[in-house]
Amino acid sequence: MTGTNFKIGAGIQTINPTSGNIIDEFEFTGPKALSEILDEATATFAQYKRSTVTQRVDGIRRLSAILSRQRDEFATQITREMGKPITQAHGEIDKCINACEYYATHLPEMLKPRDIEVTPDRAAVHLRPLGVIFAILPWNYPWWQVVRAMLPAIAVGNVVVLKHAESVTGCAFSIQDAFREAFGSKIMNTVVLPGERASETIGDDRIAAVTFTGSERVGALVAQAAGAALKKCVLELGGSDPFIVLDDADVESAAKAAVKSRFLNNGQSCIAAKRILVPRKQRSEFVASLDRHLQELSVGDPMDPKVEVGPIARYDLLNDLNDQRSRAVASGDLVLGETAHPAGPGAWFAPILMEVQSSDSPLLREETFGPLGAVTFYETEEDAVAIANDTQYGLSSAVWSSDETRAQRVAARIKAGSVFINGISASDPRLPVGGIKASGYGRELADYGLAEFANIQAVRVTSTGS
């Protein structure tokens, strides 16, 4: 088996990464069908942009109810298609429900025109929808990635054409159906396209803007295509997030959180703790605590509610991870702790933590997307900040300390879109999500996510007198 999905002439097959069995087959969306979908999305936008805020809030609340009603069904589909432990899959759907409730509650205030003092005239700033948004989104959080990126866009009044990752095509059509039922129109439209057809779709005149979540390599191609067409583009790309433990932090709490952050979602998260930075003088104590929590992880069938780590989502990704581990060992990196994984079929990779011996280690220079964590030791706080920033990425980060003032001082020097003090990186509808450097640009969630795919229109009224 070479991949979780592979082409079968005019389509793809999706494969269960736990068993290696074929789940389903899907045909690619042909040129004629794609054009019809874009026409339909454009026609839908012409109507939907006239909807009231109250009508959109009602749609969001209906979406929340659908998610609650079909929670088990959607979670099971996530687990079957990409191997996420079922308890975490339920958590992903719950997160989507929370986002719905947040926007349903706050949307009227968020979309209220902002009055600006320009005496003697009157002025206000409005958020107007742009049109049809082309969303190219990944497999690791099949539902949450769509909700966090596109629910704000839909809330403003836009319509979405979704090209989801091929390995979660079943989830993509479930998402489409749920949004259509909730809003009573075809505001969500799933297309099944090979990657090479994305650029031509970006350039289509019926597409108003683009959002992409994935690797920096593909993100650069998406940005190039969007730039050539002079279209707005939001990119949420890779990450190699530092998890900085200062010398006054509680070792046990920090080590437990580091393991949770690194191995959540089978280690397949952009904002996982990919580089754990620990004071050298606390090496022995911290490594012992890390290994203890690592050994406590339950690895196995992701349909078991007690399992915390399942298989890698795709076999090609498993091959990449095995290659990174081999190169790390060859460069001198040391195994600090490792668990076992089930025998038999499936894209299994045993969770492992390695001590980095060189700044050129692939565990520091590249993004590791799976249950493979890097631990490195530093001498001073200045060294910790330097190591944390010595990366092409700048997505998220964490700082652990018993002194909040000190942690805030360190946080201000970290080059990342988010910093979590005494907590693990996690997206929240109340806060913006996004990165800098090779981690992309633009923001999702909160009111920032609304503004990304809106025409921020200023309207000034000059009095003509009586």
Image (spheres, rainbow, N blue to C red):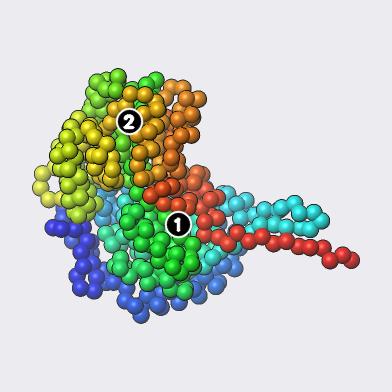
Question: At 22% from the left edge and 61% from the top edge, which residue is drawn?
Answer: 5
Q: Earlier in the sequence, mark 1 or mark 2?
A: 1
Dot 1 amino acid type: Val
On the image, the x and y values in percent for residue 132 come to 48, 68
Q: Residues within 10 Å of mark 2 (few under 14, many from 20)?
A: many
Specify whether residue 305 is in view. no
On the image, the x and y values in percent for residue 238 come to 35, 49
On the image, the x and y values in percent for residue 269 come to 33, 45
Residue identified by numbered label 2: 277
**Of residues 57 and 128, which is closer to you in this image?**
128
Dot 2 amino acid type: Leu
**Of residues 350 and 380, which is closer to you in this image?**
380
Q: Name above or below for residue 31 compared with residue 84.
A: below
Question: At 52% from the left edge and 56% from the top edge, which residue is drawn?
Answer: 452
Residue identified by numbered label 1: 234
On the image, the x and y values in percent for residue 107 come to 58, 53
Left or right, 292 with reference to 393: left
Q: Secondary structure at mark 2?
A: strand
